Amino acid sequence: MTIRVCLAGATGWAGSAVARAIAELNDITLVSAVSRTYSGRTLGEVLTEPRLNCSVFAAAQEALTAHPCDVFFEFTKPDAAKSNVLTALQRGAHVVIGTSGLTDSDYAEIASAAEKRQRGVLAVGNFALTVVLLQKFAEVAAKFIPQWEIIDYAHDDKKDAPSGTVRELANRLSKVRPSELTVPLEETQGVKETRGARMSGSQVHSIRLPGYTISVEIIFGMPDQKLTIRHDAGSSAQPYVDGALLAIRKVNSFVGLRRGLDSVLDLS
């Protein structure tokens, strides 16, 4: 059976790559798209891909009203994401979240709505396989090494900090244990903010500079040794496409909220 998808953020950097990939498929089809800039046009016209003949709407609610879907894919901005997701759940769709910037309280509200509607929500901070592996390796390392810090790198005009990738990583590590600090933050001498933000039990530092797309680095320290695990994204959105398509195919296989692409993969 073909999976009907509404793609919010379909004309963006990553969303357009996912849309073009869907045009090649037989088991997934786009029935509507969301983009304020290009509303009223067809997606194929905007992306110069004639196989994408669905309409573009200004808002998620309009798209969902006009064309019911099986999966709503959220790839917009943090200020619109939660509202879009809750609207999609109310309309009976499963949801994949690729937008970063949502908080733990946002996810708690979304999880409650998903359970109430008996739908699946898969929140993925980063769809790249190398990020999935970084998260798994970091979880293993945290079981043996009690001290670590996370550095979050992104382009200079990225407004949310830290990235969704780092929020997800910190959330995962909190389920292993909180990181230890030799000098407690309240005993820091000088400017305490230079020690980063305490997030879900991890120290996180966000850097925003030209020249970066998305990079994540976690450094584990022990006496006379350290372990560094790092992911660097290039300029192409291609690394996210395969993971996004997998998420679309898997999100109807469970009820409630799951975070991370590995939650629907067999990485044991």
Image (tube, rainbow, N blue to C red):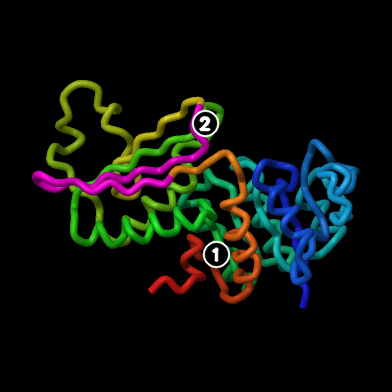
Look at the image and say whether residue 221 sits in the magenta stretch.
yes
Residue sitting at x 57%, y 73%: 255
Q: Quadrant of residue 219?
A: top left
Q: Which residues are magenta?
A: 211-231
Furthest residue in direction left, as rendered: 223
Q: CA distance from mark 1 to mark 2?
A: 33 Å
Look at the image and say whether residue 101 sits in the magenta stretch.
no
Q: Look at label 1 and name its amino acid.
A: Ser
Furthest residue in direction top, as rendered: 190
Q: Quadrant of residue 119?
A: bottom right
- Give the image location of residue 51, x and y in percent: 86, 56
- Looking at the image, residue 165 sits to the left or right of residue 192; the answer is right
Report crowding for label 1: few under 14, some 14 to 19, many 20 or more residues within 10 A (C-alpha). few
Q: Main secondary structure of the magenta part?
A: strand
Toward the viewer: 255 or 16? 16
- Give the image location of residue 140, x and y in percent: 28, 62
Toward the viewer: 86 or 56? 56
Quadrant of the drawing holding the C terminus: bottom left
Report crowding for label 2: few under 14, some 14 to 19, many 20 or more residues within 10 A (C-alpha). some
Toward the viewer: 26 or 12? 26
Location of mark 1 (residue) = 112
Quadrant of the drawing holding the N terminus: bottom right
Q: Look at label 2 and name its amino acid.
A: His
Residue sitting at x 54%, y 32%: 159
Tell me the SS state at disc 2: loop
Residue sitting at x 61%, y 60%: 242
- Above or below residue 268? Residue 98 is above
- Looking at the image, residue 83 sits to the left or right of residue 148; the answer is right
Location of mark 2 (residue) = 155
Toward the viewer: 18 or 67? 18
- Give the image location of residue 143, x and y in percent: 22, 61
Residue 192's label in the rendered image is: none
